[in-house]
Image (cartoon, grey):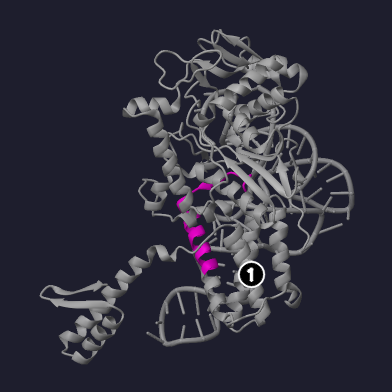
Amino acid sequence: MENQLYIYNTLSRKKELFEPINPPFAGMYVCGPTVYGDPHLGHARPAITFDLVFRYLLHLGYKVRYVRNITDVGHLVADLDEGEDKIAVKARVEQLEPMEIAQYYADRYFVFMDSLNVKRPSIEPRASGHMIEQIRLVGQILDAGYAYVENGSVYFDVEKYNKTYEYGKLSGRVLDDLLSNTRTLEGQDEKHNPADFALWKKAQPEHIMHWPSPWSEGFPGWHLECSAMSAKYLGNFFDIHGGGMDLLFPHHESEIAQSRAATGHESVKYWMHNNMVTIQGQKMGKSLGNFITLEEFFTGSHRLLEQAFSPMTIRFFILQAHYRSTIDFSNEALAAAEKGLKKLLTAYDTLTKMLPENQPQAFLEECGGKIAELATNCYAAMNDDLNSPVVIASLFEGVRMINSAADKKEALSAPELQMLKEIFDSFLFGILGLKDEKGNDQHETIDGLMQLILAIRQKSRETKDWGTSDQIRDTLQKLHITVKDGKEGSTWTNE
RNA sequence: GGUUUCGUGGCCGAGUGGCUAGGCAGCGGUCUGCAAAACCGUCCACAGCGGUUCGACUCCGCUCGAAACCUCCA
């Protein structure tokens, strides 16, 4: 089957044919979290979006190196000139080592991403572990003449860069507008120009995170880490750079400028950006205080939540929207997602039960046109800029076929059933990365079952129906479940 | 104010210049001891006003409304 993947490139604002620089290899860099708080629904979106890209590229047979960073230094609370490092602030408040904070929240991030069935990237580098690379990059930019040192800090000279190259082409901004619109802030005297940004900041005495450098004891600017680490692991020109749309400016714009100033050429072929999660029409974010953490979703412990929503419900909810659309949170929408996903998984179970034993390999050609069409539709949707909602719609078409066949209202041949299973295995589980969570509440189910069984047995004992009562106890014993009758009723243990 | 984007039925969400999106909810059937599930059928759309066109929800313009970014946020 011919697979021509098109992805939307933010740089050109068009869908472009994906042609890796060095096939069959594909390199992808995605901006990861700043680890100073629990992951929320907003973090799930890019993680799942680029997990989808990762999984699909792997499915197509590319050898993918996926790098997603952990920001544990350099990301400031306010403006660089007087801002404080987020991690450092949290460390001071909680009386902990900064690295303790970073470690704690990075671990939490990994656990929650695992539960969302997000595959671990190939490399997850940390900014604090790449000081040498970052300092070297600052040196390169200085040597190229696109930065200047002022009082121990190094700033990127945006105006000079803009004379040779073009600053703002990713976000569509014009430098003159930026200059006139940039707010005047205290202590920006060091900058020659308000649009300039810091590559290296000299640490103030109260700062607890700092490293030695040729210019001062200090710390790197936020944009620097991604340029330095992507170049280290993917080279100076790589395929895909991803992240949230909110990072377009200034973060990605500045990354482009840094890399280009240092090397003289473009660093990224395709820029991909996922849209935001909104809540009541507003972006869900830290600054607005309207975010719901993933833990709160899983336990239902947030005042806006009417129930708990499982990781797969969250994943399905996110995949039901195209990644470049905003997605609005609501209890109703999530409940609908929960039911829809259940319908898909139940149909898959039904399908598995209908399959004959030892079914040989099926081939699309021998299947009916409708199954082949289904597979074609799934590929076409994925190839059209990762259109997961259309893939899901196609799978629901498969659900209808399966259920109709189970109802004996529509005939499906054995190869057709087998092919259908392969489509579900590839798309529902492999590419969309969904899975059946039934195992998770098995314990709950067994508890409920046992309560029911014991209640029925209790009734039979009350009517002195010892035959039934003993049959239940003996049968359970064979399943290694021991029933003990006490004064307060019966209890059970499972060896 | 600038940049980017969006406005689809009760809710969520795709898509296309003429041909069913899909899910959830509703309604009417089939099935069923009852219920559930499933299946079949069905109702409810394309912000407004102009323009281009044989034909626009889809292209263009304007109006109204919303969001993100321009300061940290995925």
The residue range painted magenta reads: A323-345
Q: How many marks?
A: 1
Regarding mark 1 in the picture, which secondary structure is present there? Answer: helix
Q: Residue at x 37, y 52 (%)?
A: A299
Instruction: Classify A2 as above or below A456.
Output: above
Q: Residue at x 73, y 70 (%)?
A: A372
Q: Which residue is drawn at 58% across and 46% down?
A: A122
- Please tell me whether residue A359 belongs to the stretch shown in magenta: no
Residue A330 location (% of width, % of height): 48, 49
Q: Can residue A33 be seen in this view?
A: yes
Residue A388 location (% of width, % of height): 63, 55
- Please tell me whether residue A324 belongs to the stretch shown in magenta: yes
Q: Is residue A387 visible?
A: no
Along the line of sight, the residue nearer the viewer: A437 or A19: A19
Residue A146 location (% of width, % of height): 69, 16
Give the letter of the chain under mark 1: A
Looking at this view, name the residue that lies furthest to the left.
Answer: A487
Determine the main secondary structure of the stretch shown in magenta.
Answer: helix
Q: Which residue is drawn at 28% across and 78% down?
A: A480
Say left or right for A475 vs A79.
left
Rendered-image quadrant of the C terminus of chain A: bottom left
- Name the residue tied to disc 1: A422
Say left or right for B57 vs A409.
right
Rendered-image quadrant of the N terminus of chain A: bottom right
Instruction: Classify A254 as above or below A441.
Output: above
Residue A401 location (% of width, % of height): 63, 74
Place residue A148 in its image quadrant.
top right
**Kind of residue at disc 1:** Glu
Place residue A260 in its image quadrant.
top right
Q: How crowded is mark 1: few (under 14 residues within 10 Å), some or many (20 or more)?
A: some
Along the line of sight, the residue nearer the viewer: A33 or A464: A33
